[in-house]
Image (cartoon, coloured by chain):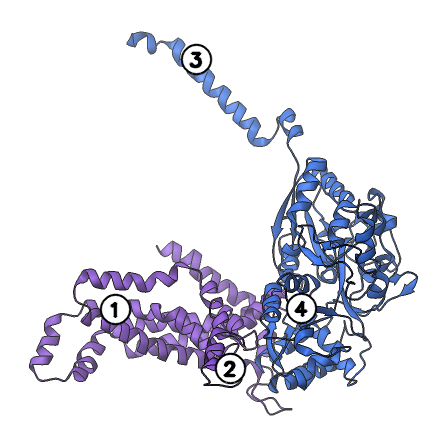
Chain colours: A purple, B blue
Amino acid sequence: MGWVFLVFFVLPVLLVGVVSVWPQNEYTLQPGFTLENYATILRGCPFDAESGDLCVTFKTYLSTLKFGVLVWAITLVLGFTIAYFVAFHVPGLAAQTVIFTLMTIPFWTSNVIRMISWMPLLGRNGWVNDTLQSLGVTRAPLDWLLYSDFSVVLAFVHLNTTFMLVPIFNSMMKIDRSLIEAADDCGASAWQTVWQVIVPLCRTGILIGSIFVVTLVMGDFVTVGVMGGQQIASVGKIIQVQTSYLQFPLAAANAVVLLGVVMLFIVALNRLVDLRKEL
Amino acid sequence: MNDEQNSPNATLQRRALLKGTAGLAGILATGMAPAVHAQEAIVLRYLGTAVNQDKAIADKFKADTGITVQYVAVPTDDVIKRAVTAPNSFDLIDAEFFSLKKIVPTGNLKGIDTQRIKNADKITTLFTKGTVNGKAVGDQGTAPKKVIYLEGEKSKVFATTPTRFMSLIPTVYNADTLGIRPDLIKRPITSWAELLNPEFKGKTALLNIPSIGIMDAAMVVEALGRYKYPDKGNMTKAEIDLTIKTLIEAKRAGQFRALWKDFNESVNLMASGEVVIQSMWSPAVTAVRTKGIDCVFQPLKEGYRAWAAGFGLPATLSGRKLDGAYEFINWFLDGWAGAYLNRQGYYSAVLDTAKAKMEAYEWAYWMEGKPATQDIKSPKGDLLAKAGSVRDGGSYDQRMGAIACWNALMDENTYMVQKWNEFVAA
């Protein structure tokens, strides 16, 4: 097990770190040591001297962070609510299993297909706009439905809610039902039971789900590209563009920075809940 | 009975048999059985983008020569990446001329001996001299004439005068311009400047492949009269800044509906009406039209941005595979494939041989810009143009003669990509 961890995780990450300090050269990878790549990434940061704007790297990270936080919050509320409904309001294990399986069905197709299927709905001449206009709600098509922050968040939520839902559901199913009865007997309202009994007991599930969602959103470049009409920057997209132009050292440096940011996130989340102790 | 089985004789036989089997396996493993080897069919691994990898071409070549072509399809950028990082993973590469500036310095390509290419002297002058019908065309960017000749078979530098060795044997090329939806625009479009015209705010799109997108942007900047580039294909840092600044201003004003990277994305944007004017590729325009939607590959007064692709050979290729690769290139220039490409709206490298394999009415429509005397069909039989219609951009001479610049790789490529990311993030 340790060997697998070494070969498939530690070694590749170390390699990325090493390449990130190699000099940039478009046709060969030549070993060396330079901090030029990091300097390039942080050029003009935090504020560009000429225009006074935030530098590209910060802007991109902020945009990616914004999506991370928004998607995290929405999937958390959605995932928790759905899991709560299935775990506590659907009677019988059989019915719960069926509903749970139904919810995983969309995952049988590729995520690109699930994304693209939004387009006929949200486009300028799409179904939503046509319906709104024929109902007289809007006069002109709403352009912000597609290729916008809205469509990116929508697709992210659609793609990632399950990753939040499954671990939370798993935690909920492990809760001893007599605890809820006890809370009820002690005169707790339904809201108090959820907030003071169920949420604390679901922390592990919430934490695992949060780690999944945050890392998936932070590293994504396909969803932002397709749903944002390629007009919205993401860190993953920048790395992808750089590798496709053989700028491996620059891409590696960006990857190291991204890795650092995501690690910080996970460390912070772990501060809230001690995952190892809870599991 | 038991005694008999354990007799020394039986053991000996078994040993001999084992030995014999091992020996045969050894010969097979080291590939030393000559009779078997000679009959083995040649398989050529053809690395390129899917656009050019037509099954019909491989099938016809196999039928004509018995050599199998195995397509390895990757995106444009990955062709360069593979050529640079994994030069032994293919036997034949179909690359764009602008990528040579990255590949040739690695020494991963072999100069192609033109003495082994039958139609080498018939390759159109657009490649060898940069002229169409005797008239010089625009050579900004990586014009093929600048990179087509190598100093020798094993050379890492381009020759400035014609030599015996070519870096790539041209296969297919075309000139790109803006695609428009005439039914939604309802007025004539004649200039690249229209891409940034506020009239089409939120209804334009640009190509998100930085090295090509920035050249389209440069065509627009020039058309707007903001700046005249000495070489759009090799900008200075200041010129890159200027171009990107123009793009960022337009983006912030909401000019672009989307940027596209994939051929199909451009088709969908246009067909769905999300976009009415955008940078486009000729087969994408055809694809929109086959859906029954009016779309024009609009010739513009500032000219076209041209591109060209060709076959290259990896430096390590030798023996029968090398012979097979030469045979494929010769076959490709021999007419059948050229006619096939011309019928798709591309242009072939050797025009004479392709003409011989096309019907007179087809040649008149595709190459001479004359009205079609009967319905024009694609190689697959789809209707492309009705009788009486004329090809966008007119004849070969008109279209290729109006080239303004070529797809290119700038010296300041790293800086350009970084600035492009800035545009995307803006």
Q: Are marks 2 and 3 in contact (CB under 8 Å)?
A: no
Mark 2 or 1: in front is 2
Labels 4 and 3 positioned on one and the same chain:
yes
Residue B157 appears at what percent x and percent y? 79, 58
Q: Nearer the viewer, residue B169 or B296?
A: B296
Q: Which residue is mark 2?
A: A144
For disc 3, the chain is: B
Residue A140 appears at what percent x and percent y? 53, 84
Image vertical order of residue A221 relative to residue B342, above or below: below
Q: Tag 3, which secondary structure?
A: helix
Q: Which residue is mark 4?
A: B294
Q: Is residue B13 visible?
A: yes
Residue B229's image quarter?
bottom right
Q: Which mark is residue A249?
A: none
Q: Are marks 4 and 2 in contact (CB under 8 Å)?
A: no
Mark 1 or 4: in front is 4
Structural crowding at the residue carrying mark 4, measured as other residues with C-alpha within 10 Å and reported as few (<14), some (14–19) or many (≥20): some
Residue B312 appears at what percent x and percent y? 73, 51
Residue B59's image quarter?
top right
Q: Which residue is mark 1?
A: A169
Q: Nearer the viewer, residue B52 or A98?
A: A98
* Label 2 – label 1 distance at C-alpha: 34 Å
Labels 2 and 3 positioned on one and the same chain:
no
A239 to the left or right of B116: left
Q: Residue at x 26, y 64 (%)?
A: A99
